[in-house]
């Protein structure tokens, strides 16, 4: 079973537990997800099955969309509702207009300091392990991209609640974003709830639940690997002889050359399809050469010979 699954992870379950549940239901050995969703959050968890686990590095490029509710005037140890309250202040003076005024400061490329309660490593240990021991260690700020940030709803009160929609790059901590927005307003804040509504074109409304998988099986929910690469990598459907050469680990100098209209920050990879339109390989472009990078099938030792003359 080599495909992807758009799963709707429920709140109260870790991403690892969700993957294990899928493995159990579908009786598959290899499975993994493309981006952790906190236990208290719900929504889209894109799961790779079988050979599709080798696509994870490319699926990481997909933007993620979230809806989060933040509470202003309250700060917690974890920046979300799971932590202990460490500060509280009357934030009834904060208005919708004030929130909207600070959001542009958090749009575009920004820097975030990862929270202590995260899975990042520090000297061989997870940050959350150190946090549980009451330790705080230095963390370097990391650059992330916020493509879109919109205020959807706002409720006045001593501790106003604001619902935001965020489209961002991988590695973005939404709870840190909420805490930073609260800090910019001078009252602090934490994330009360979080729903991941999309990963790229994979939307929550199209996601399958674990209950549906149990009852209906996965057949109609499986996403072919080639479909997952649509819009993510340029697509090339070469002559079958090229596929045979790729299977041998050999590069080609095709004429005409396949299109590679990629943004400059992305490596020049292309998705190689077979005659049936299925994903045969991921290839990388080096000047006038195309090299197999990941071949989804049997391959033998690479032979360092140009095979331009073999392409016809």
Image (cartoon, grey):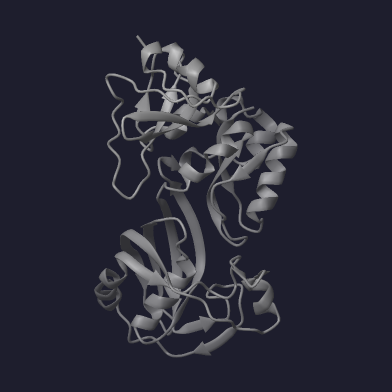
Q: Is residue 62 left or right of residue 97?
A: right
Which residue is farthest top? 312
The location of residue 195, given as percent across then percent down, is 49, 56
Q: Quadrant of residue 189?
A: bottom left
Q: Residue at x 35, y 23 (%)?
A: 253
Q: Residue furthest front?
A: 305
Asked if residue 183 lies left or right of residue 102, the reply is: right
Q: Is residue 197 above or below residue 3?
A: below
Nearest the eye: 232 or 185 = 232
| Residue in the image at 36% along x and 87% along y | 186
Kindly tell me whether residue 60 is visible in this rendering. Answer: yes
From this view, report whether residue 121 is shown above or below residue 187: above
Residue 280 in the image: state x and y as whole percent.
Answer: 50, 23
Give coordinates of residue 187: x percent, y percent: 40, 86
The residue located at (44%, 76%) in the rendering is 179
**Can residue 275 be seen from the camera position used here?**
no
Relative height, residue 82 to residue 171 (above, below): below
Q: Is residue 288 left or right of residue 171?
A: left
The residue sitting at 61% across, 65% down in the picture is: 119
Query: Which one is in front, 167 or 40?
Result: 167
Q: Quadrant of residue 141?
A: bottom left
Dividing the picture into quadrants, the one containing residue 84 is: bottom right
Q: Assign the C terminus to one quadrant of the image.
A: top left
In front: 135, or 254?
Answer: 254
How many numbered dots are placed on residues in this image? 0
Q: Quadrant of the N terminus?
A: top right
Across and down, in percent, residue 298 comes to 62, 22
């Amino acid at each position: 079973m080599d495909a992807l699954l758009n799963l709707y992870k429920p709140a109260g379950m870790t991403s690892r537990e969700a993957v294990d549940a899928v493995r159990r239901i579908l009786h598959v050995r290899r499975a993994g997800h493309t981006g952790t969703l906190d236990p208290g959050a719900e929504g889209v968890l894109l799961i790779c099955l079988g050979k599709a686990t080798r696509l994870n590095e490319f699926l990481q490029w997909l933007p993620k969309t979230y809806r989060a509710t933040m509470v202003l005037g309250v700060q917690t140890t974890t920046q979300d509702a799971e932590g202990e309250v460490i500060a509280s202040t009357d934030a009834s003076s904060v208005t919708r207009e004030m929130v909207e005024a600070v959001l542009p400061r958090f749009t575009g490329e920004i820097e975030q300091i990862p929270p202590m309660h995260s899975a990042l490593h520090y000297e061989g240990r997870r940050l959350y392990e150190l946090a549980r021991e009451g330790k705080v260690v230095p963390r370097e700020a990391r650059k992330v991209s916020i493509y879109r940030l919109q205020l959807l709803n706002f409720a006045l009160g001593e501790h106003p609640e604001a619902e935001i929609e965020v489209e961002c790059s991988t590695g973005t901590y939404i709870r840190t974003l909420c805490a930073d927005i609260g800090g910019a307003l001078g009252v602090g804040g934490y994330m009360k709830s979080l729903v991941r509504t999309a990963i790229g074109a994979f939307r929550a409304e199209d996601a399958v639940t674990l209950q549906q998988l149990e009852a209906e099986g996965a057949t109609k929910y499986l996403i072919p690997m080639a479909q997952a690469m649509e819009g993510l990598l340029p697509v090339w459907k070469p002559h079958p002889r090229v596929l045979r050469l790729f299977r041998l680990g050999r590069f080609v100098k095709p004429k005409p050359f396949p299109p590679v209209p990629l943004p400059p920050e992305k490596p020049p990879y292309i998705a190689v399809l077979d005659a049936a339109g299925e994903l045969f390989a991921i290839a990388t472009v080096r000047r006038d050469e195309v090299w197999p990078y990941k071949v989804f099938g049997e391959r033998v030792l690479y032979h360092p010979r140009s095979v331009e003359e073999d392409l016809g």
